[in-house]
Amino acid sequence: MRDKILDISARDIIKDYGMKATPQRIVVYEAMKDLCHASPEEVYQSVLEVMPSITIATIYNVLDTFCEKGILAKRMSPESIMTFDLVPEEHCHMYDCVNKKLLDYPDYSLNEIVRQRFHMRGYNLNGVEITFKVHPAKKGRHQ
């Protein structure tokens, strides 16, 4: 899914969702394409290099608008930090506890297994958000 997103220009994505492709929206989306998962502050630091006049308030507004339109998704990190996700579709994540990074775990079958288990118990899920807390394996260990 992420690979498909990376192949489309920021301008095209923004226009496809019915918005005007302003310079601020373009640089924020380009930053998200590079970062994949980021807090507003991380996006701000990334965008400052390209657009030094942008404000943190603009970053928040653009990110929130992208979420409302379905271009991005909001995720809460295990450290309770609001993080924006380039892939808005439901999917699993890994949280690298050493490097403090949220990473995609692209095994979509896990979400379906969870849905089926709840359905067997008489429940329909509104959403599934699975985050595995991990740390890098030591070299030489079998995985």
Image: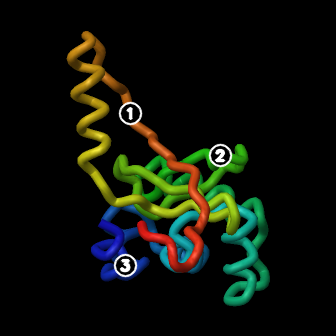
User: Looking at this rendering, what residue extends furthest in the bottom direction?
Assistant: 50
Relative vertical location of residue 100 with respect to residue 50 in this rendering, above or below: above
Residue at (23%, 19%) from the top-left corner? 119
In front: 45, or 136? 136
> On the picture, is 123 further left or further right than 63?
left
The residue at which mark 3 appears reads as: 6
Residue 127's disc is 1
Q: Callout 3: 10 Å neighbours few (<14), some, many (20+)? A: some
Q: Is residue 73 visible to the viewer in this orientation of the structure?
A: yes
Relative vertical location of residue 9 with respect to residue 83 in this rendering, above or below: below
Q: Which amino acid does the dot numbered 1 rest on? A: Gly
Q: State how far apart marks 1 and 2 are (Cα).
A: 17 Å
- In this rendering, the label closer to the viewer, 1 or 2: 2
Q: Earlier in the sequence, mark 1 or mark 2?
A: 2
The residue at which mark 2 appears reads as: 78
Q: Which amino acid does the dot numbered 2 rest on? A: Pro
The C terminus, quarter of image: bottom left
Question: Image quadrant of residue 136?
Answer: bottom right
Q: Earlier in the sequence, mark 3 or mark 2?
A: 3
Q: Secondary structure at mark 3?
A: helix
Relative vertical location of residue 122 with respect to residue 116 in this rendering, above or below: above
Q: Earlier in the sequence, mark 1 or mark 3?
A: 3
Q: State how far apart marks 1 and 3 are (Cα).
A: 25 Å
> On the picture, is 59 further left or further right than 15?
right
Q: Is residue 30 visible to the viewer in this orientation of the structure?
A: no
Q: Position of residue 53 (x, y in %)?
A: 78, 81
In front: 29, or 80? 80
